[in-house]
Amino acid sequence: MWVLPLCPGCARVPPARGSHRIQYRPFRPACAGTIRGGSADCPVRSGLLDTSTIATRALAGGQTVQILGQDVAKAQALASELGSGVLVGTTAEAPQGSIVVLAVPFDAAKSIVTGYGNALSGKTIVDITNPVNFETFDSLVAEPGTSAAEEIAALAPADAPVVKAFNTTFAGTLVAGESSGLPLDVFIAGDDSAANAFVGAFVAAGGMRPLVVGPLKRARELEGFQFVLMTMQANPEFADFNWDTGLKVTS
């Protein structure tokens, strides 16, 4: 089941079909971590915040993942689920990698960036959030004329470029890296071309296809379109959708 982390200790589960009500259930505390590059195609080091899905793709790409959890026992349990190549530490440690993936909800992502501050200097920050109003499931909460990614970028150090990526992927297909037998397309938006290429290499190493769609302001369209896809998953008119769809651009 696709589960969106809400905050340390809780989560929001996608609404049932025909309903916009959100249910709650326990969730792992948010955690941070590091992915050390070990792939010739993608020699990167990256930081990871929560979620086992991107960690799965990182491991598939030959990376070594370090999970830094608020609760070391829970972080260790997650590491055990992921298998070999995963190290564990605490969130008292700053992210050590070159890429920091904000795999947490929008508000939590802003808090993380603010909290780490200059510890993020020199790193590429990947924002995967979708700023959906989960009270109504009927709108976005980013300020008009901007995006979650742009708001996060405004809080980040000047030398820590923010790249939007992975927000159009659901957990089930992201773990597999494909949908209907085809590699997932991962849409990338950012103002720093080197950072975009860096994230693109990370995506490709995980067996997916990176598509750079433009500057960071294109995150507005990516977030809006993904919101439409999310509402379709809960719509009984689309009986075949079950939070496991994937996007693919063909020609």
Image (cartoon, rainbow, N blue to C red):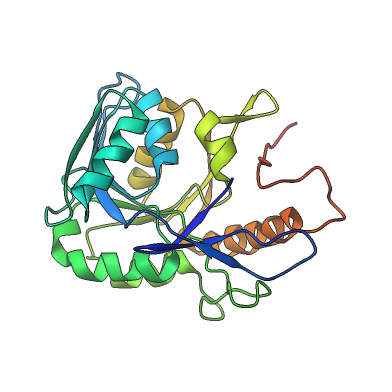
- Residue displayed at 87% across by 55% down: 237
> Residue 167 or 197: which is nearer the viewer?
167
> Vertically, is 139 above or below 201?
below
With 225 as the anchor, is 72 left or right in this view? left
- Residue displayed at 25% across by 23% down: 38
Residue 185 shows in this picture: no
**Residue that sits furthest to the bottom in the current view:** 144
Q: Position of residue 42 (x, y in %)?
A: 33, 27
Q: Position of residue 224 (x, y in %)?
A: 63, 64
**Residue that sits furthest to the top in the current view:** 40
Q: Quadrant of residue 92?
A: bottom left
With 123 as the anchor, is 145 left or right in this view? right
**Residue that sits furthest to the right in the current view:** 237
> Vertically, is 17 above or below 74?
below
> Total marks drawn?
0
> Residue 57 or 152: which is nearer the viewer?
57
Residue 191 shows in this picture: yes
- Residue displayed at 54% across by 43% down: 171
> Residue 138 or 26: which is nearer the viewer?
26
Q: Position of residue 126 (x, y in %)?
A: 37, 52
Quadrant in which the C terminus appears: top right
Quadrant in which the N terminus appears: top right
> Vertically, is 63 above or below 13?
above
Q: Quadrant of residue 220?
A: bottom right
Q: Position of residue 17 (x, y in %)?
A: 77, 59
